[in-house]
Image (cartoon, grey):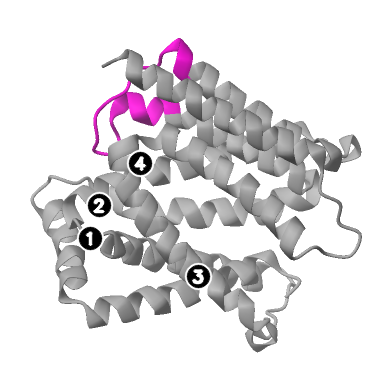
């Protein structure tokens, strides 16, 4: 499409349509959605928690600003550093609704190993000419929003007891926020709105994957914690990148040894964090 914000709206709105169809066909999901607002009314769930989807949408919006300045590789590393760092804090507070986890040396080491793994995996894609302290700081900040969003989704899920109900709330608030940003941009800039029908068909599948991802993450963080979920998701992301390069390579694609080393380091971080959990039992 040539426009990251509009691409995000396509993804979010298609995801909203998909999860809405699920809600219409399943009474338990609708009941779970109602239970969220009952919890807010009974002062069991802070109203601001409902804005978890806005954090995810804000991450996308920040990405549209930072990537052209810093590049994809630097943004990925900085945002994931923000995610892992904030994960330690939200787990300590028990923000996800699960058990609290102390900030131990092993957990800090696991987080650092994961950040190093992402740096290594993207090493051959860095361009220091794109380096910007401000852009990197914004990417770190945006990444921290994702960590908080995961924790808030876990807390919401503890009241809805239905992951698709939690996902529905996220896509309602996230899509609304992105449409608001698009409206502001069209009013205050000369940036025209593209024809959404020009989007390739496969872009509409991204929202479906997002629905499932948010539903799964909202459930998993209640049991594993945000840090461990982040470690596994980073590993999954890197393995996915490797599989895409192997199965659906673009012209000129070469499987990078840095990516393979990065994957190995990521799961070293998972093991380190796992040892931290075992040592507390």
Q: Residue 86's x, y, as percent?
A: 47, 30
Mark 4, secondary structure of its residue: helix
- Which of the two discs, 1 and 4, labels the residue nearer the N terminus? 4
Say which residue appears at 44% left-offset and 56% top-offset: 54
Question: Residue 179 versus residue 84: which sits nearer the camera?
Answer: 84
- Which of the two discs, 4 and 3, labels the residue nearer the N terminus? 4
In this rendering, the answer to whether 72 lies above or below 195 is above
Instruction: Verify CB contact (< 8 Å) between mark 1 and mark 2.
Output: yes
Residue bearing mark 1: 162
Where, quadrant-wise, is the N terminus in this rendering? bottom right
Residue bearing mark 2: 157
Say which residue appears at 43% left-offset and 26% top-offset: 88
Give the numbered dot on residue 95. Answer: none
Mark 1 → mark 4, Cα distance in angstroms: 16 Å
Mark 1 → mark 2, Cα distance in angstroms: 6 Å
- Which of the two discs, 1 and 3, labels the residue nearer the N terminus? 1
């Amino acid at each position: 499409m040539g426009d990251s914000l509009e691409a995000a709206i396509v993804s979010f709105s298609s995801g909203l349509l998909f999860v809405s169809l699920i809600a219409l066909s399943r009474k338990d999901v609708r009941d779970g959605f109602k239970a969220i607002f009952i919890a807010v009314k009974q002062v069991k769930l802070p109203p601001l928690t409902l804005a978890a989807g806005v954090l995810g949408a804000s991450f996308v919006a920040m990405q549209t600003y930072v990537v052209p300045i810093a590049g994809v590789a630097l943004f990925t590393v900085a945002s994931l550093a923000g995610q892992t760092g904030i994960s330690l804090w939200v787990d300590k507070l028990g923000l996800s609704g699960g058990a609290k986890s102390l900030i131990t040396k092993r957990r800090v080491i696991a987080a650092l190993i994961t950040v190093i793994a992402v740096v290594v995996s993207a090493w051959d894609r860095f361009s220091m000419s794109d380096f910007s302290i401000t852009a990197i700081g914004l990417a770190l900040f945006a990444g921290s929003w994702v960590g908080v969003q995961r924790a808030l989704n876990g807390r919401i899920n503890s009241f809805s007891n239905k992951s698709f109900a939690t996902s529905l709330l996220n896509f309602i608030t996230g899509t609304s926020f992105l449409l608001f940003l698009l409206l502001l941009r069209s009013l205050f800039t000369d940036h025209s709105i593209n024809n959404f029908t020009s989007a390739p068909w496969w872009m509409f599948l991204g929202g479906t994957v997002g629905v499932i991802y948010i539903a799964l993450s909202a459930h998993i963080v209640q049991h594993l914690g945000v840090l461990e979920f982040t470690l596994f998701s980073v590993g999954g992301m890197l393995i996915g990148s490797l599989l895409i390069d192997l199965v659906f390579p673009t012209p000129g694609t070469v499987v990078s040894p840095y990516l393979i080393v990065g994957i190995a380091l990521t799961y070293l971080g998972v093991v380190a964090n796992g040892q931290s959990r075992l040592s507390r039992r």
